Image (tube, rainbow, N blue to C red):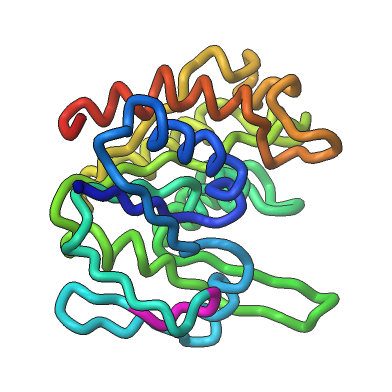
Amino acid sequence: MKKILWCGGSHLANARPLIEEAHDTGALGAFDAEFYVTGGPRNRDWSGAGGRYTVEGSVVSGNAHEPERRIDLAAFDAAVFIGQYIQPFKAFIGDVPHSSSVVERTLRELPIEGRFHDPERGIRHRWYNEPLVLFPPLVSGPTFLLPDPAPVGKRYGDVPQPLKQAYHNRMTDFCAEAGITYVDMPPELFTEDGRTRRRYALPGDALHMNAEYWHVVFDKALLPAMTQIL
């Protein structure tokens, strides 16, 4: 049976029930699903400390979340990244001024490299988004990427639209260069200032979304983009 590899971190976990349903009884019934945690703080900090995947032909292994697990990427007919640090607030961090020059410098590194600083834990490093570079050439079929949901908070809404557009352009340009299909989110998910509508957020959480959000994403964005393999 054909197989799809689903990669990511917390957003993958939120979407997983819907993914499993699609494989069991829905549009992805012709494919088996496997899940591989390639995102999340543990993998970010591991890469920031110099951790890298072990590569043997098309087999990768050794990340921080599942160090003993070996994944033969050539055995998959497609791979889908959900999130994988494609987070707009990484370009508009903290109290950094919303200037085009500052954002331009930041976007030169994203989404492959980024800076992380946690004063409470004494951590400061540059992380490396290795799966986006390493995996696509080794998978036997296309690779798709769903960006992280846009935040719901007003602070993100206040970021000038040209800067948000510059971020989006950088992500789509990177994916085109890397041979990844970037999946744009349906416009109905957003407010006029680019935030995700609060109705889609998990209670008390500005960054992670509920099942209704992922249903819209799958039905109106991801599955239409995957018609080449369905």
Q: In which quarter of the image is residue 194?
A: top right
Q: Provide the major secondary structure of the magenta segment.
A: loop
Quick one: 76 or 162, which is closer to the camera?
76
Residue 72 point in image, percent of width and height: 24, 70
Please tell me which residue is depicted at 46% across the width and 78% down the height of the picture. Answer: 63
Residue 85 point in image, percent of width and height: 51, 55
Please tell me which residue is depicted at 71% across the width and 80% down the height of the picture. Answer: 123
Residue 113 point in image, percent of width and height: 45, 66
Quick one: 159 or 9, which is closer to the camera?
9
Please tell me which residue is depicted at 19% across the width and 58% down the height of the picture. Answer: 139
Quick one: 126 or 149, which is closer to the camera?
149
Asked if residue 174 shows in the view, the reply is no
Is residue 49 placed above or below 200 in the rendered structure? below
Asked if residue 76 shows in the view, the reply is yes
Is residue 218 placed above or below 76 in the rendered structure? above
Query: Going by the image, does 111 lie left or right of 93?
Result: left
Is residue 20 placed above or below 86 in the rendered structure? above
Q: Is residue 63 in the magenta section?
A: yes
Query: Going by the image, does 228 lie left or right of 10?
Result: left
| Quarter containing the C terminus | top left
Is residue 146 placed above or below 48 in the rendered structure? above
Q: Is residue 160 in the magenta section?
A: no
Stretch of the chain drawn in magenta: 61-65
Residue 60 point in image, percent of width and height: 30, 76
Number of numbered discs overlaid on the protein picture:
0
Q: Quadrant of residue 156?
A: top right
Query: Going by the image, does 166 lie left or right of 163?
Result: left
